[in-house]
Every structure is written in structure tokens, then in C-alpha cells.
Image: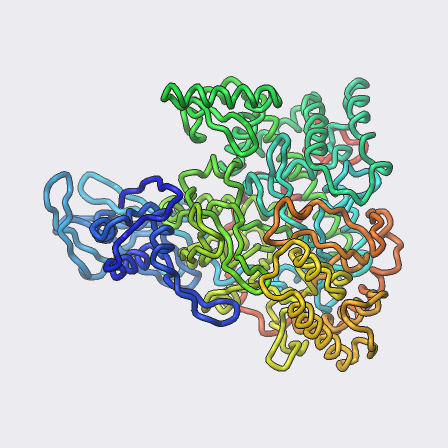
Amino acid sequence: MAEQSSSSAAPHFVTDMTGPLHRLAQALGVQPEYRSAEGETVQIPDRTLAAVLTALGARCETRAQVEDGLRALDDARFARPLPAFAHQFAGNSARIPFTLPEGERFGLSLMTESGTRVPLTEVGPVTETRTVMTEGAPVLRQVRTVAIPADLPLGEHTITLTSGHRADTMPFIVAPRTVPTVEDVTAAAMAASDSHRRPWGITVQLYSLRSRISWGTGDFGDLRDLMAISAEQGADFVLINPIHAQAPVPPVENSPYLPSSRQAIDPIYIRIEDVPEAAYIDTDQRLAIQSLARRWGKPAITADPIDRDRIIADKIAALELLYKVPVGAARRAKFRRFVERAPQGMRDWAVFNAIYRHASSGGAKAKRAAKSLQKDSARSGKDTVRILATGVAWPQEMTGPRAEAVREFEAEHAGDIEFWMWTQFIAAEQLRRAQRTARELGMRIGLVTDLAVGVSAGGADSWTLDTFLATDATVGAPADFYNQQGQDWSQPPWHPRRLADAGYAPLRDLFRTAFTGAGGIRIDHIMGLFRLWWVPRGNAPKDGAYVSYDSEAILAVLALEAHRAGVLVIGEDLGTVGPGVRERLTELGVLGTSVLWFEQTESGLTDPRDYRSLSLATLNTHDMHPTAGYLNLADIELSEELGLLDADPREVYTGERSNRQDALKTIAEAGDLEPTDTMVGTIDDVWPVTVGLHAYLARTSAQLVGIALADVVGETRAQNKPGTSEEYPNWTLPLTDGTGAPVVLDDLDGGDRLPVIARIMNASAHEVAADRPVAPATMDEERPVGPEPAAVAESGTRPSDAATTAPDTEDDDER
């Protein structure tokens, strides 16, 4: 079906085309209705359906266009010899359709990723026939299926169909039945410690947790120290916010959930002093870096919002100095190997950053000149430049990473591109070092990273992956009680057909980068692997529709990559969840998310024994106020202040105060909280209540429990207020205590609050649930994936010798 760019307005159509419009929607995966979080069925208006279909590339202005689109989709099914992609889970035997002209001789085979050829001979009879116009002549094409053996090894394989003088291929993966489970990931550590207590850990927004030597924001050095503090208390993991890359120069997006790229790690988290090359800089370089560092540190620690623009500018300046330090052959070889093994998306990110920085190097004056140039080009009818949302003038001839102008730029600016790859080399070193520290100190899981739903419309991934994204829509969420206008996350969604046509390679590379140095991963809005709420350009957030994806194919890619990396997977499955989603994720071994305040039955708070076993249980999320604020209705107060309440504020206050008071009563009756007459909204000393809530949480049957560091220190402010942008300082608030004073990492070590919660968690006798899913099949053969970790030079080790002190195989074993 032909694709076209759409305007912001929804297309007009006649009312008698509802039948074909709905058939086209079904064919392209657009859902005409959904079940809300409140359990109500919501119908999508035809006008909205048409707008979403247009964003998918369909033409919907007339009934004839819709019917032409349906025919084109049907014809395309017969024109393609093999599907774009196929998969099977271990032990299953898939049947793959293939299409050929009537009577044409053919052969089928499968090549495993290790190079073993497997003939495919179990071919079924013709199931469908269709006459298709081919090069102006009618050709009768027939559909058959071929069986794939059930005993294939796990991995990425290739199916080849030969016929006549041509050979067609398709990627085919065999995935384990489940992702690694809590038992799988913790097995070795549990055997060593003979400990069967349920794992618990700390959740934290890493940027908010600063130390006295941080450069204004938490970094990987702080993460490593937090690992040590947490491990000493008996914690088994630390779950952090997404660390995806943002823009390489100011202005920088504050939200970690709206990154420039999910294919790379944000250099802002690099601890400058821990870069091995820092020990070997000359005097001038050392003085320059010390001058940058003096802007931060202890005197700069306040409760004011974090200034990412200044931080990234200073860190990039320091990293450029360190990048120029001469290193020995072994260190250079390590870096070269990292680059050679890096996913294509990461290399494209480096190119984007080099172009972006080059285009923005002139500052405000250059941006004004660029806007003038854009006006001149528009008047002349020749588009030579476009202005990104950040004001950067982007050359139009650099339409994508494979454009000829981009290749020329790469040749001229190879050093700039290599610098950005080097930042990834360093970031991976520091991440793996933090994970190694966690494991050495007895953590059974270690680092749990977070994967954002999507990317910024003007960032690196939107450029490098442009052909796989739908740029005339954004991702969001339908209206619910907490966000009554719906949500628009300003992220272009994956285009389902284009992603499938690429064999899901962009998604595979994304997972590989996200798993770097981790023992687990949290996938934000994991329902997005099944369907996403598309908001057509120009529509309000609530005026969208769900678009379905081939979830089984995506889950197969996820399972294979998680198995290879040895990471457990946690899915954030809150809010509006489609039918069967939680059940399928449970079958796959993915842990869900259970938030105490959301776990409700008709009679009140869910009994701890009735929590889902396969879940991470917490008191709150990053979109909620911490406990100290939540118990005093700070979230309702803020919503009223910002005009986000649709209902009468008095009714909302009364209803929420009653709900939260009832929850505390239930917890008190369970013996986890002292009975009190103190009313929600007027609690002066929240700490005893916070302790009681954690005691209740510790008795749940969830396999993992997460403790928010914000709750431990008494923070009252939310990191994010959904539905706002400039109205609230989202994602910029440093960690503070109940008085509003800044909390630094150095003060946590030896503090008296974390040990109280730790004793509660460690005393829990709950064992890892016995009713775990079937264990993943064992790989017949392993191969390294993604960029290799480079060695970290410890104190006193020359960067040139680092490769020999910590070989790749050691880092590979640190997951």
C-alpha cells in the first residue's frame, strides 16, 4: 500500500464507509475500541481511526481509497515469496508460509547462526491461490507452508527459498520459552551464600543522588558507592532511571524518558575522575579539568533544580581532554574491538552527535543565521536546511545516516565521530565496574536499568531510525483517573510493518545496549510491546487509538537477548492493560509491577498473600509523590494548583483522604502499623507510617520488593507530574529530606533510616516462589553480543596496560 506524508488535520470521509474503514483498521492493527482502566469499553470515533490510519501511511479521504488500500494489502501478501520475519519458541515447531508461481520448482533450507545447514523438506499442500500482476502480466501464485524442526538451537538463523534463478532469504529466530527468572539470575549467589530470602533492593533516580564530588548530578561513581552501601544492608539490586543518551550539547531534555537515543548511554553519567586516562594527563589538562570540577562539588550542593545544560557542557569539555591522552597498543585494541562490535544504532548515534554538534557550534548567532537561511531557502523553493526543536540548523541533504552527504561528513570528521564512540566505551566500563562491585559485595542481581518507551522526535534515533518510525503520530496514553486529559509523550512510535520488514533488528540492538552491565532491566510501559496509544498529529492526547504490534515476534526477540545477557526482566504494567497481556508476560517469566496503593479489591487493600508472585512490589512509582508527600495529599494539592483536576477539588480531596485512610486502617489491623487517629493530610511525623507500610510490603508474595530511596530519606516532592511540562520542574529535583534540605550520598552511609527498612526486609522469611515458569532452554552455543566491555584500569594501572589486567572474559562474567 502506498504511503504518503499526512497533514495535521484528520482526513474527511463519507459516513457510509465505516465498514471498509474498520476492515482496513483491523488489517493494519488499529483497534476500534479498548477497555479503559475503569473497565469500560470505549469506542474510537471513525474520524480518529482515519487519522491514525493516515499516520500509518494509508489513504482514507474516500471510500475508494480505503478499498484500494485493502486490495493492495491482500495482493502484497501473495507477491512476497517469504515473510519478512518469523520465529519460534524452543521446543515448538513453526510452519512458515511461502509463495511461488504455480508449478515453479523450489528448495528450502535453514542456516543456523553457527553455520550449520538444515534442509527443510516437510512442505504442505497449496493452501491459497491468487492471480497477481507481475511486471504487467498476470501470474498465478500459490501459498504453501514448510515445517521448521522443533530441535533447533536458540539463536538467529536464516531461511533461504531458492526458485528459478533467484534466492530469497528471511531472518528466523529460535527463542527460549522464558526470560531468565529471579531464580536463574540469583542461583549462583544463593548457592554461595546459602541464602533463600526474597531479594529486595533500592530504587532511585540516579541523577538526583549526588555526592560531594559529583559534578551536579549523580553519576556511575555514585552508583558504585550506592551499590556498596546497599549491599552492606543486605540489598540485592539497585534499580535506576533510564540512562539513555540526550542531546550532545545544550539545551538538554530533562526527562530520562524522552531521550535523544536509546541506542547509547548518556555521557552525563560518566565519573570523570574514574576514567583511566585521567591518571596520565599533563599538567595543563589536569588544571583545566580541576577548574571545571570546582564549579560543582560540596559548595554547589543545594536543593535547586539540576542544571543539565551546564553539567553536560562541562563533562564533554573534560572528556575531550581525556580522549586526547595517548594510550598504549593494548588499550587502543580494546577500544577498536568495542567499536567493531557495537550495534549499528550506536555508531549512527555517534555520527548524529558529530553532525549535531558541528551544526550548533556557532551558538545563538549561528542559530539566528540558520533561521535566516531557512527563510531564504523557502523563498527560493530550495530546502537546504531545517531547524530542529532545539534550534539547530540541520542540513536537508543529511536526511538519514546512509545519505551521501553523511558519508562525506564521516570521512571529513572521523575524529569527532570516534570521540562519541569513545564516550560509550568509557560509559560501558564504568557501568560494568559498578555491576562487578555489586556482585563482589554479595548482591545477587546488582544493577537493574530502565528502558524508556520511546525517543524524542528531534533526537538521534528519530534520525537514524527514521524509516522505522511513524513521524505523523506520537505515543501516549488514554485518559484515566490520574490523567484525565490523557497523555502525550511526544515520541514517534515504531511503525509495525517497517519494524517487521527489518527483521526487528533495531529492537534487537536496542535491547543489547539496554542490557549493558546489568543484572536486570525494567521496561517502562511494557504493554507497548503489544500495542501503543497513537495520538495523530494535531489531536488531543485522549483523541487517539491503540495500534497493535506483533507481540509474539517482539517477545521472542526480547527473550533471546535477555537469555544471552543473563538478565531478568521487569515490566511496568500499570494503567490500561490489554486483555491477555499480563497472562502472556507471566508465561514468558517477565515480572509485573505491583504498587501497594494500586493493589485494591472491592473490600479494600489487597492482602499481602494475594500479590502476584511474579512481580516487583513497591510503595510508589516515579510518577507519584513519595510516601511523605502522598500521605499528606501533596499530589492532590499540586494537581489542584496546576489546574489538572477535572472533578470538584473538594470531592477529590475527600475521596482520596478516605481511600488512603482506609488503607492505613487495613495495615494497622494487619499489625504492621500502630493504630492512630492521625488523619491523612495532617501527619506531622510520617516516618513511623513509612516503616509500617514497608513492613506490610515485606509480607507480600512478590518475588522482588523495591524500596524507594526517596521514602527512606523523607522526600516529599514528586520527580515527575504527568500532564505538565514547564509548569513543574520535572526530572530535575535533587534528593532532599523532609525539611527540604539536600541529601548527599555520603550521608547515607551510617544513616539510621536505611538500616531500619533493611532489617524489615532481611527478616522476611519469604522464599523465591516455587511456582516459577519453565526454566529457559540452554544455549547449545554462546556467542558474544553487543560491544565488548573494555577493561577498567584500577588505581596505579596504566591505560595502555588495562586490557591485560581485566580481560573481556572477566567483564563478560560480571552480568
Count of picture labels: 0
Residue placed at 64% from the left, 64% from the top? 616
Residue plotted at (61% across, 64% down): 593
Estimate the x, y position of residue 605 in percent, counting from the top left: 66, 76
Q: Locate residue 342, reporting x and y percent.
A: 54, 36
Query: 399 or 813: which is nearer to us?
Result: 399
Q: Position of residue 607 (x, y in %)?
A: 67, 78
Task: Name the side, left or right, on which 671 lies relative to 491.
Answer: right
Q: Is residue 463 left or right of residue 810?
A: left
Residue 94 visible in the shown view: yes
Q: Position of residue 172 (x, y in %)?
A: 38, 51
Name the one closer to the observer, 548 or 481.
481
Left or right, residue 250 beside residue 272: left
Task: Name the residue at the left extreme.
Answer: 137
Residue 545 occupies quadrant: bottom left
Give the vertical position of 53 relative to 261 (above or below): below
- Name the one closer to the observer, 512 or 293: 293
Using the image, determine if residue 339 lies above or below residue 436.
Answer: above
Residue 273, quarter of picture:
top right
**Quarter of the image where one finds residue 755:** bottom right
Tell me, yes or no, if residue 609 can be seen here.
Answer: no
The structure residue drawn at horizontal position 52% and vertical position 70%, both measured from the top left corner, is 38
Please say if 95 is above or below 813: below
Residue displayed at 65% across by 24% down: 329
